Each structure stands twice: as C-alpha cells, then as structure tokens.
Amino acid sequence: MSILQISIAAMPLLLSLVSRSSKAIAPCLLASIFTVLLGDEPHRAVMAWCVGTLIAAVAMREWLRTI
C-alpha cells in the first residue's frame, strides 16, 4: 500500500481522536487496521473503512453537539 492509501485508511482513527470520545477510538483503530490488512481485497477493505468512518462520524456529531 502507498502512503496515500494508508493515510486514507487511517482517517476513521484520526476523526475519532479529534472527537475525543474514548469509546470510539478502539473500534475505529480496529477498522483502520482491518482496512490496511484487507487492502488486497478492495470490497472488504471498503466495508471495514465505511464502518470505521460511520463510528467516527457519530462520535464527531456527538462532540459537536456538546460545543
């Protein structure tokens, strides 16, 4: 995988770190790891990435709601 692909795969983790929700960091980390590991099989990697991004998006929404 190239640096660009790895940085895109790490996006859910980075979003969960910004949201500062400790409950969302672990699942997003696992989704990012699965995305990198499944990089040879694009359909499975996209599913893992989408799940991680969805979890991170909900955490971001809750964080923005508290502001």
Image: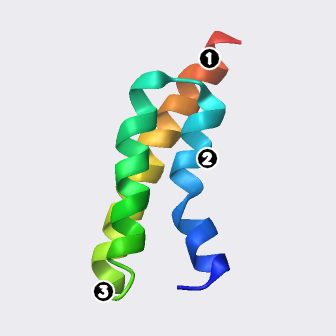
| Residue type, label 3 | Glu
Q: Position of residue 54 (x, y in %)?
A: 43, 47
**Local crowd at mark 3 within 10 Å, few (<14), some, or many (≥20)?**
few
The structure residue drawn at horizontal position 37% and vertical position 55%, both measured from the top left corner, is 31
Q: Quadrant of residue 65?
A: top right
Q: From what the image shows, is residue 33 above or below residue 12?
A: below
Residue that sits furthest to the top in the current view: 66
Hey, which quadrant is residue 10 in on the image? bottom right
Q: Residue at x 28, y 75 (%)?
A: 44
Residue that badge 3 annotates: 41
Spatial CA distance of label 2 from label 3 is 23 Å
Which circle's residue, 2 or 1, is located before the other in the chain? 2
Question: Which residue is depicted at the point 32% across and 67% down?
Answer: 47
Q: Which residue is mark 1?
A: 65
Amino acid at pointer 2: Leu
Amino acid at dot 1: Arg
User: For the residue labelled by badge 2, is the local secondary structure a helix, a strand or a loop?
Assistant: helix
Helix, strand or loop for disc 3: loop
Picture coordinates of residue 4 (x, y %)? 66, 78
Q: Which-is-in-front pick, marks 2 and 1?
A: 2
Query: Label for residue 14?
Result: 2
